[in-house]
Amino acid sequence: MHASVFRLLHQGRAIDRDKLRASHPARGELHLRLRVNGREPQWDILLATLEVGGRYVIPCLDRARVVEIRGRWMHLHGVEVNPRGNSPKRLVSDNYRQEWWCKVGVVARGQVPAP
C-alpha cells in the first residue's frame, strides 16, 4: 500500500517535536510481511518495509506491531535494523527501538496508483 512514513525515534531516542514537524516523510510502498510463522498467531513476527522500485527507502522495522489505527493513520512499533559491513559470513547490525506513524493511501512521488 502507498504510504508516507514519519520516523519518531533516532537511534532509539525520541526526535524533537519541532524537528518532526519540519521534516518531510519518507514515501513509498509499505509492506508488512510475515518473517517467522509462530505456532499461534500471537507468536508471528512481522517485518515492515518501505520500498520504492524494490529498494528500501528507510531501514526495515523488525518485530513490527500495529499499535494503533486512526482513520488513514497507522502507528507501528518495532526494532530498526541497520546492517554494518558487507561480509556475507559475518552479519553485523545495529538494532534500535523505533516507531513509525504511517499515513496510508498516499501516492508516492512519481508513481501512479493502479486502477
Image (cartoon, rainbow, N blue to C red):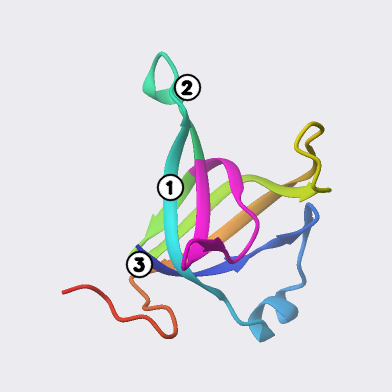
Give the residue type that dot 3 points to.
Arg
x 78%, y 36%: residue: 91
Vertical side of 85 occupied by 113: above or below: below
Q: Return the x and y of residue 104 as percentages of the image width and height.
A: 38, 67
Give the residue type that dot 1 points to.
Leu
Q: Which residues are magenta?
A: 47-65
Q: Are the two marked residues, 2 and 1, in contact with CB atoms closer than 8 angstroms?
A: no
How much space separates mark 3 and mark 2, taking CA atoms? 26 Å
x 67%, y 51%: residue: 98
Q: Are the two marked residues, 1 and 3, in contact with CB atoms closer than 8 angstroms?
A: no
- Position of the C terminus, as image quadrant, is bottom left
Earlier sequence position, callout 1 versus callout 3: 1
Q: Residues within 10 Å of mark 1 (few under 14, many from 20)?
A: some
- Residue 55 forms part of the magenta stretch: yes
Q: Quadrant of residue 17?
A: bottom right
- Residue 82 forms part of the magenta stretch: no
Which numbered disc covers residue 43? 2
Residue most extreme to the left: 115
Secondary structure type for disc 3 = loop
Q: Quadrant of residue 103?
A: bottom left
How much space separates mark 1 and mark 3, taking CA atoms? 16 Å
Q: Return the x and y of residue 4 as percentages of the image width and height.
A: 48, 72
Earlier sequence position, callout 2 versus callout 1: 1
Q: For the residues carrying marks 3 and 2, which lies nearer the camera in this image?
A: 2
Residue most extreme to the front: 88
Which numbered disc covers residue 14? none
> Which residue lies under the disc numbered 3?
72
Q: Return the x and y of residue 101 as percentages of the image width and height.
A: 53, 63
